[in-house]
């Protein structure tokens, strides 16, 4: 993570944290801390909130680059092989986690992924410690074994769903009653993703790096290169526009999916879009990338559990176009902060992109104001952290434990 990100990681949670003296010890458990995905970021954000509220934050994982971020916010990391999916390894981790819970006097255990959730559940049960989970995705349910494996995520006394869509999925497919589910949307760092804090120099540097000349409308689809993220639909939509005055960016690494990247490159060549569409492996300054962009697209063909890109873009006042399913239905205000289009429909996506690019300055400014307000009122890290701490309080109060 770059220095600008590190410097701002505390600001939103600190500003919004409730002024209560909290003394509980919270243990979060996840496979590893080596990526910048939503699970890993959420873990760091909640650890920071626990510390800022006066509690003690522990994280057990196999480790990774984000250990440094945990240290910066005052949390403690314990390296354990909880990333294993081997049944024997999962069983052995029960004892390791139970020992950790007892040794560190853990008050609440919070699991964020399936394999470590099984170990954490039985360790919490063995030590009579409250156990909660965060349900981050829909997970494949193709056979009985998969459904059993997934069921670790609904064994918490409370289950945090990251969207109304996920809450409905939990009720429908796992039979969990509503009273055990708490809906807490993921949040944006309102300091990092603020137009006032993104300098022109950063935007210019990125434009130069990506060879984006002045005067071209820029349309961006951020996300790792994988078929369900809809990059092929995006390219087909751009081809239908038949415009040479656009610059369109696919920002995200292929993570070893070299064949799919080659397929995308071939599709760009097939439509003679070499000057129009560019694939960018990664970006260390996403706020600047959004500010460089006139329209941000999320074209996922499968429902997003939440979709953080959509709220990050809105936080910076960018118009968004997302597919009409999953979490996007909760984050996009139709025709006010962006537009929803049918999944897998390049024609509808092309129409929406044309509409967004064609907005006049007054319409664009009105949309930007509405988008920023939408995120600040509903999707900040501060709100996410407050609601999570409230879940901890609720659970701990039920057993007359220490407040958090």
Image: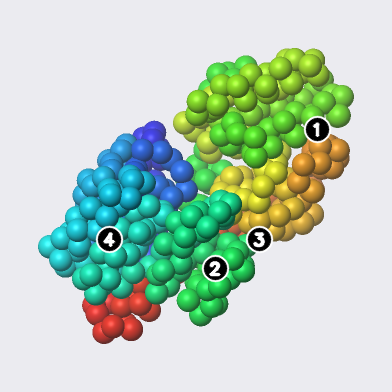
Q: How many marks?
A: 4
Does dot 4 land on a helix, a strand or a loop?
strand
First-in-chain label (4 vs 3)? 4
Question: Which residue is rendered at x = 42% and y = 72% of the image?
Answer: 158
First-in-chain label (4 vs 2)? 4
Q: Tell me whether the residue at label 1 lies in contact with that at label 3, contact meaning CB atoms closer than 8 angstroms.
A: no
- Where does the N terminus fall, quadrant-wise? top left
Q: Which residue position is annotated with label 1? A: 237
First-in-chain label (3 vs 2)? 2
**Gap in angstroms between the C-alphas marked 3 and 2:** 22 Å
Q: Which mark is residue 5?
A: none
In which quadrant of the rendered view does residue 111 lie? bottom left
First-in-chain label (1 vs 3)? 1
Question: Which residue is rendered at x = 60% and y = 21% of the image?
Answer: 259
**Gap in angstroms between the C-alphas marked 1 and 3:** 24 Å
Q: Which residue position is annotated with label 3? A: 330
First-in-chain label (4 vs 1)? 4
* Nearest to the observer: residue 44 or residue 188: 44
**Gap in angstroms between the C-alphas marked 4 and 1:** 46 Å
Q: Is residue 381 visible?
A: no
22 left or right, relative to 302: left
In which quadrant of the rendered view does residue 46 lie? bottom left
Q: Position of residue 51 (x, y in %)?
A: 27, 60
The crowding category of the residue bearing disc 2, from other C-alpha atoms within 10 Å (few below 14, some 14 to 19, many at least 20), is some
Q: Which residue position is annotated with label 2? A: 174
The mark lying in front, picked from 2 and 1, is: 2
Q: Position of residue 165 (x, y in %)?
A: 62, 62
Report the residue that reaches farthest toward the left: 103
Q: Which residue position is annotated with label 4? A: 27
**Gap in angstroms between the C-alphas marked 4 and 2:** 25 Å
Does dot 3 land on a helix, a strand or a loop?
helix
Does dot 1 land on a helix, a strand or a loop?
helix
């Amino acid at each position: 993570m770059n220095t600008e990100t590190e410097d701002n990681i505390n600001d939103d949670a600190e500003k919004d944290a409730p002024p209560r003296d909290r003394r509980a010890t919270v243990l979060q458990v996840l496979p590893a801390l080596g990526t910048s995905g939503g699970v890993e970021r959420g873990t760091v954000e909640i650890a920071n909130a626990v510390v800022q509220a006066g509690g003690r934050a522990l994280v057990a994982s196999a480790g990774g680059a984000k250990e440094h971020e945990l240290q910066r916010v005052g949390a403690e990391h314990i390296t354990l092989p909880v990333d294993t999916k081997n049944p024997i390894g999962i069983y052995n981790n029960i004892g390791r986690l139970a020992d950790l819970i007892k040794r560190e006097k853990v008050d609440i255990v919070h699991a964020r992924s399936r394999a470590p959730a099984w170990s954490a559940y039985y360790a919490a049960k063995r030590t009579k410690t409250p156990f909660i989970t965060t349900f981050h995705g829909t997970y494949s349910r193709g056979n009985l074994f998969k459904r059993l494996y997934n069921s670790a995520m609904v064994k918490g006394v409370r289950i945090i769903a990251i969207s109304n869509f996920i809450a409905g999925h939990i009720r429908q497919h796992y039979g969990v009653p509503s009273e055990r589910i708490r809906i807490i949307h993921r949040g944006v760092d309102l300091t990092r993703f603020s137009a006032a804090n993104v300098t022109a120099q950063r935007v210019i540097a990125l434009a130069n790096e990506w060879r984006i000349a002045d005067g071209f409308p820029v349309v961006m689809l951020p996300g790792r290169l994988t078929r369900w993220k809809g990059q092929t639909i995006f390219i087909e939509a751009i081809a239908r526009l038949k415009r040479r005055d656009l610059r369109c960016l696919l920002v995200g690494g292929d993570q070893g999916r070299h064949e799919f990247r080659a397929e995308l490159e071939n599709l760009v060549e097939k439509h003679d879009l070499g000057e129009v569409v560019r694939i960018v492996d990664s970006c260390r300054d996403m706020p600047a990338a959004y500010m460089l962009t006139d329209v941000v697209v999320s074209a996922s063909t499968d429902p997003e559990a939440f979709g953080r890109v959509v709220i990050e873009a809105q936080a910076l006042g960018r118009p968004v176009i997302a597919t009409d399913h999953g979490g996007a239905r909760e984050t996009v205000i139709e025709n006010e902060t962006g537009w929803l289009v049918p999944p897998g429909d390049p024609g509808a996506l092309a129409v929406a992109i044309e509409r967004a690019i064609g907005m006049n300055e007054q319409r664009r400014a009105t949309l930007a104001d509405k988008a920023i307000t939408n995120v600040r009122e509903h999707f900040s890290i501060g709100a996410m952290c407050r609601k999570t701490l409230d879940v901890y309080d609720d659970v701990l109060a039920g057993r007359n434990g220490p407040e958090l």
